[in-house]
Amino acid sequence: MHIRGDHAELVVGGRLDVRSAADARAALHTAVDSGHGDLLLDLSELTSWDATGLGVIMGVHRRAGRAGRRLVLRRVPPQLQRVLVATRLHRILAIEGGLAAEALPRV
């Protein structure tokens, strides 16, 4: 897992899972605490994730809200878009540009 960027925009790549969660959480919390305004989280380089990784994203979302900031997900991979829809997290998290039509449930 790698995270690069600053307190306004970060790119997360590699695996966001139980093994990388502590490092990711620390880096993302530092970004939240050291900035203001929206925190953009570019997920385009994310190759895999698990429930712990989703928990890290939700924790950062809550922390940003408490700090008067908003976490905005950018360039979310299609597979993760489907997970966000299946877990209904797409209703809670801000996703730049919304979700791809194929990620949304068919009615």
Image: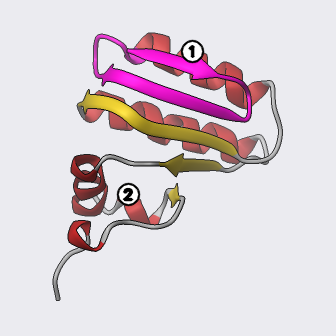
Residue at label 2? 89
Q: Is residue 79 above or below residue 56?
A: below
Per the image, is 14 magenta?
A: yes
* Residue occupying image coordinates x 80% and y 24%: 34
User: Toward which corner of the image does residue 21 lie, by quadrant?
Assistant: top left
Residue at label 1? 26
Image quadrant holding the N terminus, namely top left
Label 2's element? helix
Per the image, is 30 magenta?
A: no
Q: Crowdedness of circle 2 by 10 Å Cα count: few (<14), some, many (20+)? A: some
Question: Looking at the picture, how far across and down is residue 77, in whole percent?
Answer: 31, 46
Q: Is residue 87 above or below residue 38?
A: below
* Residue occupying image coordinates x 26% and y 52%: 78
In the image, farthest residue toward the bottom = 107
What amino acid does circle 2 point to?
Leu
Image quadrant holding the C terminus, namely bottom left
**Cα distance between the residues tagged 1 and 2:** 22 Å
What amino acid does circle 1 point to?
Ala
Q: Is residue 49 above or below residue 104?
A: above
Q: Is residue 41 left or right of residue 30?
A: left
Q: Which mark is residue 39?
A: none
Q: Crowdedness of circle 1 by 10 Å Cα count: few (<14), some, many (20+)? A: few
Q: Is residue 81 left or right of residue 68?
A: left
Q: Which residues are magenta?
A: 1-21
Q: For this rendering, which residue is in front, 6 or 89? A: 6
Label 1's element? helix
Question: Looking at the picture, how far across and down is residue 14, in whole percent?
Answer: 33, 20
